[in-house]
Image (cartoon, helix red, strand yellow):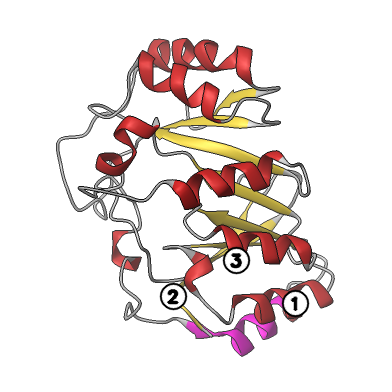
């Protein structure tokens, strides 16, 4: 499997773990505020193979204890389960970041015991989901199914939303709260502009707005947090 990027150390992306992040190209969404737009297409340049990743992890034993697979959309890669199996056989915990568009693949990874933690993006409420994902129309049933899978508590998980204007307001979070009602963990993270964001004109919420949004969601979930402020 070709790997399109690696962050060799993160203390923030895998709760309770010192981890590296593996970036995989290819995505079925086109979120206009995406930080990783260079990974939208599967032909993005590779930085290593899965064999080289295993070699890297061999050298990091004792320094790292987790590996995050993200994208793009990592679940598009058919080879992913085999790579995860190899990583777990080395004693590493595995986290998956997903946009929720491939519930069958998500469920199979959970059933096979290949992920220890899952993070799923909740882009917006259902009414504005497609436009927030850069689509005119979108089949939301796979995303809804992925929400149900994680709410079944078969693996530790979190839901998260990147918050930005003009996509989000109070109504967004009233509806998101109902979408993920009963969730264990939900995080809001403010949009941060970067050179890799393909489209311009977006702005981050104020700290006051973020706090208000968090309070709106709080009655629906066990734990609400804000990252990146």
Q: Are marks 1 and 2 in contact (CB under 8 Å)?
A: no
Q: Nearer the viewer, residue 131 or 82?
A: 131
Q: Nearer the viewer, residue 37 or 228?
A: 37
Image-based side of 8 in relation to 154, left or right? left
Q: Would you place residue 188 above or below residue 78 in this image?
A: above
Q: Name the residue tied to disc 2.
A: 4
* Rendering coords of residue 157 (x, y %): 68, 43
Magenta residues (range): 48-57
Image-based side of 201 in relation to 49, left or right? left
Q: Which mark is residue 105?
A: 3
Mark found first going from the N terminus, 2 or 3: 2
The answer to whether residue 54 is magenta is: yes
For label 3, the crowd category at 10 Å Cα-Cα, with few meaning under 14, some 14 to 19 and many 20 or more, is: some
* Rendering coords of residue 126 (x, y %): 38, 33
Q: Which mark is residue 85?
A: 1
The answer to whether residue 64 is magenta is: no
Q: Which image quadrant is residue 114 in?
A: bottom right
Q: CA distance from mark 2 to mark 3?
A: 21 Å
Q: CA distance from mark 1 to mark 2?
A: 19 Å
User: Which of the two marks, 2 or 3, is nearer to us in this view?
Assistant: 3
Tell me, yes or no, if residue 170 can be seen here: yes
């Amino acid at each position: 499997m070709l790997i399109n990027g690696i962050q060799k150390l993160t203390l923030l992306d895998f709760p309770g773990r010192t981890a590296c992040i593996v970036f995989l190209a290819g995505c079925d969404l086109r979120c206009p505020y995406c930080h990783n737009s260079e990974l939208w297409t599967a032909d993005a340049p590779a930085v290593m193979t899965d064999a080289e990743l295993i070699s890297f992890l061999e050298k990091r034993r004792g320094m790292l204890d987790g590996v995050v697979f993200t994208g793009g959309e990592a679940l598009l890669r058919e080879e992913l389960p085999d790579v995860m199996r190899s990583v777990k056989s080395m004693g590493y915990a595995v986290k998956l970041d997903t946009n929720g568009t491939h519930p069958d693949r998500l469920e199979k990874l959970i059933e096979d015991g290949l992920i220890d933690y899952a993070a799923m993006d909740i882009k917006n409420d259902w009414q504005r989901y497609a436009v927030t994902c850069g689509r005119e129309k979108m089949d939301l049933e796979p995303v809804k199914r992925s929400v149900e899978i994680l709410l079944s508590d078969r693996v530790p998980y979190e839901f998260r939303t990147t918050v930005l204007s003009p996509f989000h307001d109070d109504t967004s979070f009233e509806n998101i709260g109902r979408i993920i009602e009963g969730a264990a963990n939900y995080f809001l993270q403010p949009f941060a502009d970067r050179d890799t964001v393909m489209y311009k004109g977006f702005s981050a919420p104020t700290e006051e707005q973020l706090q208000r949004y968090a309070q709106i969601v709080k009655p629906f979930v066990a734990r609400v947090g804000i990252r990146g402020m």
